[in-house]
Amino acid sequence: MLGVIKAANAAVMFFLEIGTLAVVCYWGFANGWSWPAKIVAGVGAPVLLAVLWGLFAAGGGENATYPLRGLLRAAFEIAWFGSGAVALYAAVSVGPAVIFAAVYLVNALLRLVWNQT
């Protein structure tokens, strides 16, 4: 049973990663800027985040070019997922942003307890 819960927690992590990219993309297109700026923000911000994830955190660090460990990994994740929560707050409202951040925190704590990266 615990194995199923751990697998579900890993799936939640994946959906949080995809959700961060999606909400940053939405934020880029939902702002009140001109269309060229919307395109740059809506496409550029998620691409930048994806590149950073690939460089420093992909596959729990196993597939990353420059894997981060320990506190650096924690700080990177907090900043990365925090950017998703901030973008959600800026594009939608505080409620969904708080829920997103809370789901990330619970997921991160469970991954820490279960030694999942």
Image: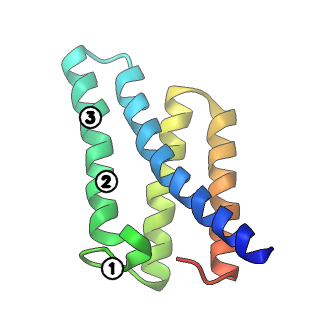
The residue identified by callout 1 is 67
Marker disc for residue 43: 3
- What is the distance, in whole Å, between disc 1 and disc 3 at their CAs? 25 Å
Looking at the image, is mark 1 or mark 3 earlier in the sequence?
A: 3
Quadrant hosting residue 5:
bottom right
Where 66 sits versus 42, above or below? below
Instruction: Tell whether label 3 touches label 2 (CB within 8 Å).
Output: no
Residue at x 31% of width, y 53% of height = 50
Determine the secondary structure under disc 3. Answer: helix
- What is the distance, in whole Å, between disc 2 and disc 3 at their CAs? 11 Å
List x then y, in percent, for residue 13.
56, 60
- What is the distance, in whole Å, between disc 2 and disc 1 at their CAs? 14 Å
Q: Amino acid at mark 2?
A: Ala
Residue at x 69% of width, y 34% of height = 95
Classify 10 Å Cα crowding around label 2: few (below 14), some (14-19), many (20 and above).
some
List x then y, in percent, for residue 88.
53, 36
Q: Amino acid at mark 3?
A: Val
Marker disc for residue 50: 2
Determine the secondary structure under disc 1. Answer: loop
